[in-house]
Amino acid sequence: MKRISLGSCPAPAQQGITLIEMMISMVLGLIIISGVMGAFISTTKTLRQTDDLSRIQENARVAVQLIGRSLREAGVTPCGLPPGKGLIVHTPATLANISNWWAGGTDFKDSIRGYPASAMSNFPAKDSSTPPVSGSDGIIVVSGGEAATTVSNDTGTAMTVQSASGFTSNSYLFACSVTQGYGVVFQPTGLSGTTIQHPAFTVTGIGTLAPTHVGRLTAEGWFVAPNSEGGTSLYRGFLQNNGTATVEEIAPDISKMEITYLLSGENSYTATVADTAWPNLLAVYINLTITRQPAGSSTDPITRTVGLTVNLRNRFELSSTGTP
């Protein structure tokens, strides 16, 4: 048998990839990577847009819900006064300047005060750090339903209530009598436990008022102002009895608020409303513009608008002279 020597077999030729094959592989790899990166960028952009739209919708929902609730509470009190009777301003020395505290005159007939964009420089519910933006309206809502409680006894200068803990000595309070059909506005002269001390309530024409309910009046203003992040937000300002306001941010990305009013006997909304129009004010329409700049993007901002119609209630029919 003939032996075959392995050492005498020629070694197989070693071959690598050619330059052309390498270039084709690199091109194919770049195409695949470009496709993956394109899909990633597109997905990321879509997610950002979806997130921005979700934030816009959430901010709009919060703004509409809170301002709508505030408007529906305009003029509310637990007094249940009959038509023709409104809360009146009792003016001892301590209330000499109450007409400056958004009480609507001398009989509390005005529970909504509209401020068009041209009058926002005089808007009382702002502070020095939140100047209203140009071209946006504002509104102030007055109500009296907070911390309301029943009066079980009144000596003429002191009321016995369930609890006086919801009141402070510098608050504006109201006291009303359903049987006498009147209410008065006052500041307490003292508070302790279940007792509220007050000036004597003497109402022209009926004498001493015997209150059956007491509560705290609130006045809150709604407006749009710049925020700390370089954008704009919807703000709410609570008016204090010293003429200042405590302001809080409600919803970001609100860039403009337009307010119109529907009066009894009219078939269209008007951009302005007189301070004395409360008895004839049927509805308020709020139009909010929401503007959001996409994060880390130089593209145009996303803008949406949302409208809210609020039918008003709790309005007492006053006489043509505005007196209860």
Image (tube, rainbow, N blue to C red):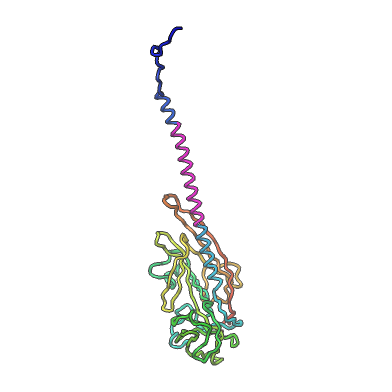
Give the residues in magenta: 28-55
Which image quarter holds the C terminus? Answer: bottom right
The answer to whether residue 14 of the structure is visible from this angle is yes
Q: What residue is rendered at 43% in x and 66% in y?
A: 132
Residue 249 point in image, percent of width and height: 45, 65
Q: Closest to the observer: 41 or 271? A: 41
- Residue at 58 percent across and 76 percent down: it is 314
Q: Nearer the viewer, residue 124 or 70?
A: 70
Classify 302 as above or below 172.
Answer: above
User: Is 25 displayed left or right of 277 in the figure?
Assistant: left
Q: Quadrant of residue 96?
A: bottom left
Whether 45 is among the magenta residues is yes
Residue at point 55% right, 73% down?
A: 73
Q: Is residue 121 left or right of residue 61?
A: left
Please determine whether, in this image, residue 204 is positioned above or below residue 30: below
**Is 237 situated above or below 158?**
above
Point out residue 183 in the picture as x, y percentages from the top left corner: 54, 84
| Image spot of residue 131 (x, y percent) | 40, 67
Residue 72 horizontal side relative to residue 192, left or right: right
Q: Is residue 110 visible?
A: no
Q: What secondary structure characterizes most of the magenta part?
A: helix
Q: Nearer the viewer, residue 272 or 156?
A: 156
Residue 179 in percent (x, y) is at 60, 87
Is 168 inside the magenta-drawn segment?
Answer: no
